[in-house]
Amino acid sequence: MIHTLCEPHSPRSTQRTLVSEPRQPLRVGDIMSVSPVTIAPSTSVHEAQALMHQRKIRHLPVLKDGRLVGMLSDRDIRLVLPSPATSLSVWEIRHLLDKLTVGEVMTYFVMTTAPDCPVTEAVGRMLGHKVGSLPVVADRQVIGILTRTDVLRAFRRLHAELSAVA
């Protein structure tokens, strides 16, 4: 199930700045990561884990036929890994992870947001539901992803800009 945080507002100019005018709050589209890495539900968990490690990311939107059907996080993967105390060999573990698919371990109830949604609203939803990312959807297409890292980068830039003004 997909739940959109807020619907798109009126069109805005394509030029965006971090420090917004008083009447225009910072929007998700101003700070999101564009063109996120995505994955198919039929992909093995081992492949997904390798992709996340290679790209240094913690969240993957799961798309089937171009539509968002779930989210996979590094936590989802950690929860299906055997205990370090297991008697399985490394090769047995890898064999099991090759058989297990993303569709079997992903989160199906996905919160999404729109690029024109205020960042404060999106962050409030992330905190309230204890999620680390929100796929950004426009015209039923995943166009970006808002992560805790994006929010922290924006905070750091905004703080530096405010410090320079003061």
Image (tube, grey):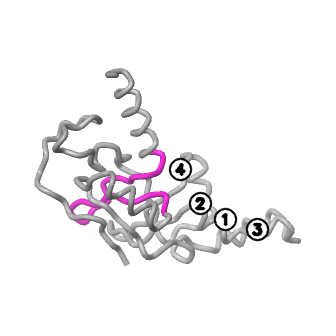
Identify which amino acid the numbered label 1 is placed on: Arg
- Of the two numbered discs 4 and 1 on the same chain, state the one appearing first in sequence: 4
Q: Is residue 147 magenta?
A: yes
What is the spatial separation of the Cα atoms under label 2 and label 4, in whole angstroms? 8 Å
Is label 3 in a helix, a strand or a loop? helix
What is the spatial separation of the Cα atoms under label 3 and label 1, in whole angstroms? 13 Å
Residue bounds of the magenta highlight: 131-149
Is label 4 in a helix, a strand or a loop? loop
What is the spatial separation of the Cα atoms under label 2 and label 1, in whole angstroms? 6 Å
Name the residue rendered at 44%, 34% in the picture: 156
Residue under numbered circle 4: 57
Question: Residue 37 location in percent, x, y?
Answer: 44, 53
Residue under numbered circle 1: 78
**2 is higher (above) or lower (below) than 122:** below
What is the spatial separation of the Cα atoms under label 3 and label 2, in whole angstroms? 17 Å
Chief SS of the magenta region: strand
- Of the two numbered discs 3 and 2 on the same chain, state the one appearing first in sequence: 2
- Of the two numbered discs 4 and 3 on the same chain, state the one appearing first in sequence: 4
